[in-house]
Each structure stands twice: as structure tokens, then as C-alpha cells.
Amino acid sequence: MAYSVDINNKKLTLIKGDITQQDTDAIVNAANSSLMGGGGVDGAIHRAGGPKILEECKEIRKNHGICKTGEAVITSGGNLKARYVIHTVGPVWHGGNNNEPELLAKCYKNSLKLAVENNIKTISFPSISTGAYGYSIEKAAPVALNTVMEFLSENDSLTEVVFTLFSSLDYEIYKETLENILSGRNRK
Ligand code: APR
């Protein structure tokens, strides 16, 4: 399952799959502020990437402290196909009146900025905050897609952004959301 669209001559791709298997230059981890690993995507990336990633996270903690919600840090990819892992901390859903959409958008924006600073051309995102952090995927997908599309419209250095959705349902929700955004744009 894959679906690609062209945004300002760059590719925005949706696929159903496991982000640890992606061979984009970077993959993004849905981390927590401690950067010490966890379950879900975080657990999968540390398991597949090996101890080097955690060692680099410990170095980041020593030099810069915790990673605040909405912020992003970068490590190597360890044993992964991806050369880099960008760790970002999504907002926990607390009902929608605690700046959740703005903080979620910051995760995508700061991850993309960090990718550009490191001359990364292709990057894969999971659906940040829509697992343990309780952000409904129907509410998160428009924020994620609009933020990435806006960045691709304004920035020329990336060539492809991939959303790697772990289930068919998540994939279908992102695909429908993306189609709605694009049809809305065409209507204007
Ligand atoms: N590849 C792609 N997507 C995945 C994978 C994987 N291997 N594993 C899980 N997912 C999906 C989940 O199905 C969900 O849609 O990633 C999305 C985010 O889920 P979580 O990993 O639970 O991340 P999040 O909701 O941001 O919660 C982060 O969970 O694992 C802990 O340490 C982490 O405390 C942090 C919190």
C-alpha cells in the first residue's frame, strides 16, 4: 500500500509499513522527553537500531538535558538502514485545549528543519502522538499533513517525505485526509 503526491516538485508519500525497515536518509522516532527509549515506535527503533542510538541519546541528555515536547534531536541510525534517527517528543492528548495541535505541528517542523540542517534529502515519519500519547489519528493526520505540505511548499532541499503508517486503518485515514486537503486546495 503506497500513495504518492507531488508537492512543489517534491514527493509526499504514504505507505503502510514498519518505520524501522525504511531506507530513507532519516527516520523519525516518536520519543519521550527522557530520550531513554520506551514502547511503540521508540522501542522498535532502539531494538532495531541497537545500543549506539541510546549511547548517543545519553550524550545528548548529558550536554543538553531532556528533549522538550515539540523539540527534536538527531542521532546516527546505528544498525538501521537509515543513516539518521531524528527523535521528537509529541504532545500527550489532554483534551485539545493545551496547545496539542501547535505542539504536534512543532514536532514535524523541527524534525524537518533538523533534516535540512543535516543535508538529509529523504525522511520517514511515524504518526506521532497517536499511540500511547492518545492523540486521535483523525485529529492528528490533518496537522501532520498540512505542516509537512507547508514545509515542502516553502523549502527546496528535501526530495521526499514519507509517512510510514503501521496499520491499514491508519494508512486509510491519512490517505483520505490527504485527498481531502488536496481537493480542498483545488477547489479554491
Ligand atoms: N513503525 C511505524 N509506526 C509504528 C511502529 C513501527 N514500527 N510501531 C508503532 N507505530 C505507530 C503506532 O501504531 C502509532 O500509530 O506509531 C504511532 C505512534 O505510537 P507510539 O509509538 O505509541 O508513540 P506516541 O503515541 O507518540 O507515544 C510516545 O510512547 O513508546 C513510548 O517512549 C515513547 O513515551 C513515548 C510514547
Image: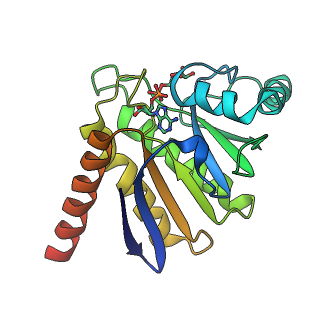
Quadrant for the N terminus, please: bottom left
Marker count (numbered): 0
Depth check, front residue: 113 or 141: 141
Q: State the image coordinates of residue 130 (x, y, percent, origin top left).
A: 38, 31
Depth check, front residue: 94 or 168: 168
Asked whether residue 26 is in view, the answer is yes
Depth check, front residue: 68 or 139: 139
Q: State the image coordinates of residue 50 (x, y, percent, origin top left).
A: 77, 30
Q: State the image coordinates of residue 7 (x, y, percent, origin top left).
A: 41, 73
- Quadrant assignment, res 94: top left
Could you tell whether 68 is left or right of 96 in the image? Answer: right
Quadrant for the C terminus, please: bottom left
Seen from this angle, which residue lies furthest left? 187
Is 176 located above or below residue 107 in the figure? below
Q: State the image coordinates of residue 109 (x, y, percent, origin top left).
A: 53, 51
State how the image is colored: rainbow
Q: Residue at x 67, y 19 (%)?
A: 34
- Quadrant assignment, res 79: top right
Is 4 located above or below residue 107 in the figure? below
Asked whether residue 188 is in view, the answer is no
Q: Residue at x 69, y 51 (%)?
A: 82
Seen from this angle, which residue lies furthest bottom? 9
Q: Residue at x 35, y 38 (%)?
A: 167
Could you tell whether 125 is left or right of 140 in the image? Answer: right
- Quadrant assignment, res 158: bottom right
